[in-house]
Image (cartoon, rainbow, N blue to C red):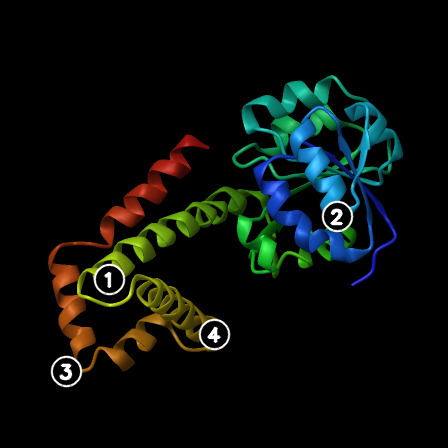
């Protein structure tokens, strides 16, 4: 994928460090501020990112400006900067609605996105609203882009970005259990991770089959899968996951 655009980055932190390995392959020119000297120096050395003196200099040269600062700082940061008509601001600020950020970046247009750090491996399922051709091309370097039809669905869908971390904790718990049974820890970790990936791949590649049917195909009478699921359902093990998602949604 080749792009001939200048992309400015406001807030080159943890997420950007994981997105840059993929985004750098698009052929775009990337600009960051020297404010975060350790990160900017790393990005410059590793990916050829250009380091400028301040954020306004970045904006003045960019067609797309990625804002990846902490959500509670974003409005204040952007209000202190001047954007131009025809520019696009790509917000990666989780939980920050357009009604808060759009006035601060006017007259530029706003696009919202929610990638995860798996972007490093081009495996991030990235939410985006609204559809935007140039932003899609950029974000597709990080993995599949899912454009939403309304902003109302952005917050509940973005909750799954946290589910990503919860699944990692589940992998950790189960791989530790496998290792405790005497299996080599490296094999236990890879086995659990790959089994999780295999389950997700089946769900993704069979979209016309309800997930409940996929489960029932495995959880046949007297099967080990069914026995384990019966224990989990008896303990109401899945309800807390939904409660956790509800708690996050209420904070938005």
Q: Which mark is residue 221?
A: 3
* Residue 1: % across, % down: 78, 63
Q: CA distance from mark 2 to mark 4?
A: 37 Å
Q: CA distance from mark 1 to mark 4?
A: 34 Å
Q: CA distance from mark 1 to mark 3?
A: 29 Å
- Which residue carries the number 4 mark? 207
**Image height of 98 relative to 158, above or below:** above
Tell me which numbered mark, 1 or 3, is placed earlier along the sequence. Answer: 1
Q: CA distance from mark 1 to mark 2?
A: 38 Å
Residue 130 seen in the figure = no
| CB contact under 8 Å: marks 1 and 2 | no
- Which residue carries the number 2 mark? 47
Local packing at callout 4 (Cα closer than 10 Å; few below 14, some 14-19, many 20+) is few
- Which residue carries the number 1 mark? 179
Q: Nearer the viewer, mark 1 or mark 3?
A: 1
Tell me which numbered mark, 3 or 2, is placed earlier along the sequence. Answer: 2
Local packing at callout 3 (Cα closer than 10 Å; few below 14, some 14-19, many 20+) is few
Q: CA distance from mark 4 to mark 3?
A: 25 Å
| CB contact under 8 Å: marks 3 and 2 | no
Label 2: which secondary element: helix
Tell me which numbered mark, 1 or 4, is placed earlier along the sequence. Answer: 1
Tell me which numbered mark, 1 or 2, is placed earlier along the sequence. Answer: 2
Give whichever of 97, 46 is nearer the camera.
46
Give whichever of 26, 213 is nearer the camera.
26
Give whichever of 246, 78 is nearer the camera.
78
- Residue drawn at point x = 28 percent, y = 66 percent: 184
The image quarter containing residue 159 is top left
Residue 146 lies left or right of residue 81; in this view the side is: left
- Residue drawn at point x = 50 percent, y = 46 percent: 158
Label 3: which secondary element: loop
């Amino acid at each position: 994928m080749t792009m001939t655009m200048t992309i400015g980055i406001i807030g080159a932190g943890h997420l950007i460090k994981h997105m840059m390995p993929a985004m750098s392959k698009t052929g775009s020119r990337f600009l960051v501020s020297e404010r975060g000297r350790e990160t900017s120096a790393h990005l410059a050395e590793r990916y050829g990112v250009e380091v400028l003196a301040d954020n306004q200099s970045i904006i003045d040269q960019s067609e797309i400006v990625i804002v990846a600062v902490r959500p509670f700082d974003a409005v204040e940061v952007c209000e202190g900067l001047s954007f131009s008509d025809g520019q696009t601001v790509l917000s990666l600020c989780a939980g920050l609605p357009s009604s808060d950020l759009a006035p601060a970046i006017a007259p530029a247009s706003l696009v919202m996105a929610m990638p995860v750090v798996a972007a490093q491996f081009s495996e991030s399922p990235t939410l985006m609203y609204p559809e935007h051709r140039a932003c899609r091309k950029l974000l597709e370097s990080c993995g599949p882009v899912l454009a939403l039809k309304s902003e109302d669905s952005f917050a509940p869908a973005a909750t799954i970005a946290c589910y990503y971390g919860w699944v990692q904790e589940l992998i950790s718990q189960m791989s530790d259990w496998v290792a405790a049974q005497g299996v080599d820890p490296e094999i236990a970790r890879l086995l659990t991770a790959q089994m999780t990936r295999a389950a997700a791949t089946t769900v993704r590649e069979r979209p016309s089959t309800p997930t409940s049917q996929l489960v029932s195909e495995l959880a046949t009478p007297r099967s080990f899968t069914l026995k384990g699921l019966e224990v989990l359902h008896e303990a109401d093990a899945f309800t807390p996951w939904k409660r956790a998602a509800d708690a996050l949604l209420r904070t938005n």
